Image: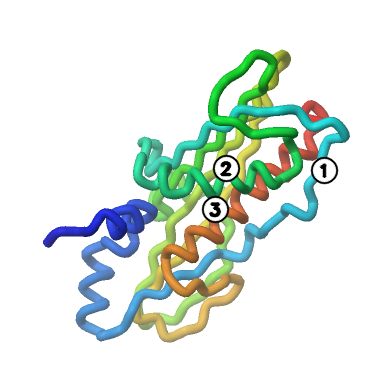
Amino acid sequence: MSISPGASVRLSFTRLIAAAAAAAVLVLTGGCASHYVDAATRDRTAEFQRPASPAPVQLVFQFETKGAANSRATDHLKPRVSEQVKSSGLFSSVQDTAAPGVALLSVTINNVPMNDDAFSKGFVTGLTFGLAGSQVSDGYVCTVKYMPGSGEPIVKTARHVIHTTVGASASPGNAVKAKNIEEAVTLMTKQLLSTALNDLSHDPAFR
């Protein structure tokens, strides 16, 4: 069965929809998948400590799946990440290329499996489901590294989770239900990046 380029991009964000077990449950139960964005991480834009004299920055963004570069997801999310950094008010300008005297801002979002103990530690989730149906959770780690023209790099990390349920009858708590996986990824990315940027803005070395 062939998959359209658009569908491939959406599937690349998460393994949840493509999981054979979930697909089997979906067919057998006649239900549909529901996506929830964990509420433990929220939009922190209003809390930014903006510098009195913002400086220009070069932005480099990459989306990863278990630490490996995911070019399709990177291309899909890059415009949104770039716009969010530009509108943050933390920098006087945001550009794609290097220039003398311009700092570097590296943003990486890594999609990691929550069922792997090595990655699941540190994630905070608040969902409780009934025994009926199934749930799979995907973790996302955002690493923001700010490298000024001189001095030590400043590194900030934030975490987020998207939960997908198939056939679950119980209503989840501490999470926001999305219309689809695209909306879930969009909300997750905005909240995740704003949390990391907020931590960066409050670092004395950045200000």
Dot 3: within a 10 Å radius of its alpha carbon, few (fewer than 14), some, or many (20 or more) residues? many
Q: Is residue 117 above or below residue 203?
A: below
Q: CA distance from mark 1 to mark 2?
A: 19 Å
Q: Secondary structure at mark 3?
A: helix
Q: Quadrant of the C terminus?
A: top right
Residue 183 rendering spot, x and y as whole percentages: 48, 65
Cβ atoms under marks 1 and 2 closer than 8 Å: no
Q: Residue at x 36, y 41 (%)?
A: 70
Q: Which mark is residue 49?
A: 1
Given the image, on which type of amino acid does mark 1 rest?
Gln
Given the image, on which type of amino acid does mark 2 rest?
Ser
Residue 188 rendering spot, x and y as whole percentages: 54, 57
Q: Nearer the viewer, residue 27 or 184?
A: 184
Mark with earlier residue (1, 2): 1
Q: Is residue 31 above or below residue 13?
A: below
Given the image, on which type of amino acid does mark 3 rest?
Thr
Residue 101 rendering spot, x and y as whole percentages: 69, 15
Q: Nearer the viewer, residue 22 or 147?
A: 147
Q: Which mark is residue 189?
A: 3
Q: Residue at x 73, y 35 (%)?
A: 91
Q: CA distance from mark 2 to mark 3?
A: 12 Å
Q: Which residue is mark 2?
A: 82
Q: Residue at x 41, y 75 (%)?
A: 34
Q: Quadrant of the N terminus?
A: bottom left
Left or right: 62 in relation to 21:
right
Q: Identify the residue at the far right of this view.
A: 52
Q: Secondary structure at mark 1?
A: loop
Q: Identify the residue at the far left of this view.
A: 1
Dot 2: within a 10 Å radius of its alpha carbon, few (fewer than 14), some, or many (20 or more) residues? some
Q: Residue at x 39, y 73 (%)?
A: 165
